[in-house]
Amino acid sequence: MLNSTWNPEGLFGNGGGQDIVPSLLPRLFAELPADDYRLAAVLHPNIWYGHGPGQIRVWLDRACRSGMTLIDPVRAWRQALMAADVVLGDFGAVSYYAAALGIPVLLASAEEDRLDPEAPLAAFVRDAPRLDPREPLRDQLADLLVGHRPLAEPAEFVTSAPGASGELLRRHFYGLMGLREPAASALLEPLPLPAFDPPRRTHPLDVRTRVSGEEVRVERSAGHPYGSPDETHRSVHEDTLDPEDLVTADVIWRDGPPDDPRLGGPDAWTAEVLHRYPHCAVAAFVSGPGCCTARTRKHGVLRLSAAPGADIDPAAYASALHAWLVHGGEVPPGGVTLRVRAAGEVHPVMCAW
């Protein structure tokens, strides 16, 4: 989770004079595999309403098309924080809350001039690990996770009465007003479960693959900055910003309900894509969180579905199928189970006619 407070020295300000965000975001999506990492951004409400929501979305458009989720700054930031494995932040309070929850924090902007040197937050900023923008980001995140040891001080200073804020604050407020407190218990409204919102990656994805029998290693990212001995191909969502991306794509895909009358169904849509784009080898229609329909030029229509234990974006199934077929794979009449290795796991995927 990327988090920024709202003044010019924050992460979404000028990065302490380095203007870090414009260079950091493309690198995050290039260096972090799409199926291993999910990125979300929590920006202080004053950023949203100081610049305007439209301007924020324009600035972050490419990042959102690469899969970043913009979190509602009022209604959903706490849920995002609790779900985070790592917070990449600054000297704002949310980074401190993350540390209080025991979440690893890496500071990308850590200006101390804005802080009271005696404040607990200032001590945290002085001691917290720093992002080095010159070094590989993936290695820094991995090292942070492996070496993380929760700090006692943030949790101690955030609250001395965990879970009791509703009761204590109401008692204090009624005391200030000189009124008798209600007899009913002071309860806090529970945080709602956010809606299911998978990342929508319409920026082209470069895919590195390695095939060994029915096992296919897949690593997708929005641009690979370094050379690789693995085979590569390009996977592009039909809604990519630049239509020319589709002309050279090896895999073209889209997502949506299979009964969408505008598309004619997965079979018709995949046939139209292969007809329209001669370079494309696989057209895939993702119709649910664990299934997609893929059409290839040699095998026709194939159904790809997650077997028990599979848990990645079905668009990755299409890339695995493409790599496997390029390596001479043949789908027998009864189908085949591909083992897609991604995100540190092996995901079994059924491939059948």
Image (tube, rainbow, N blue to C red):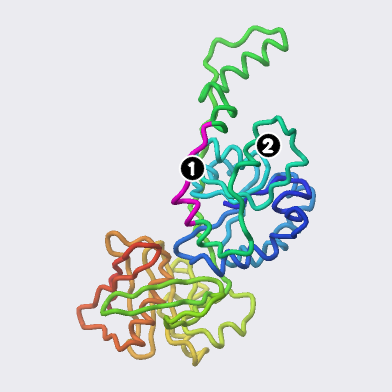
Going 56% across and 31% down the picture, which residue do you hit? 153
Earlier sequence position, callout 2 versus callout 1: 2
Badge 1 local density, few (<14 within 10 Å), some, or many (20+)? Answer: few
Magenta-colored span: 142-152
Q: Position of residue 50 (x, y in %)?
A: 79, 48
Numbered disc total: 2
- Pointers 2 and 1 in contact (C-beta within 8 Å): no
Asked whether the viewer can see residue 42, the reply is no
Q: Nearer the viewer, residue 244 or 87?
A: 87
Q: Quadrant of residue 62?
A: bottom right
Question: In the displayed structure, would residue 60 be above or below residue 194?
Answer: below
Q: Residue furthest bottom?
A: 278
Amino acid beneath label 2: Ala
Q: Residue furthest left?
A: 334
Q: Quadrant of residue 182?
A: top right
Q: Which residue is mark 2?
A: 122
Going 51% across and 48% down the picture, which residue do you hit? 84
Q: What predominant SS class does the magenta segment belong to? A: helix
In the displayed structure, does residue 306 sit left or right of residue 231? left
In the displayed structure, does residue 62 sit left or right of residue 322? right
Q: Which residue is mark 1?
A: 193
Q: Secondary structure at mark 1?
A: loop
In the rendered view of the protein, which quadrant contains the C terminus?
bottom left
Q: Nearer the viewer, residue 260 or 313?
A: 313
Q: Secondary structure at mark 2?
A: helix
Q: CA distance from mark 2 to mark 1?
A: 33 Å
Q: Nearer the viewer, residue 154 or 203?
A: 154
Q: Nearer the viewer, residue 290 or 109?
A: 109
Going 34% across and 90% down the picture, which residue do you hit? 298
Q: Position of residue 235 (x, y in %)?
A: 49, 78
Q: Position of residue 205 (x, y in %)?
A: 52, 74
Amino acid beneath label 1: Leu
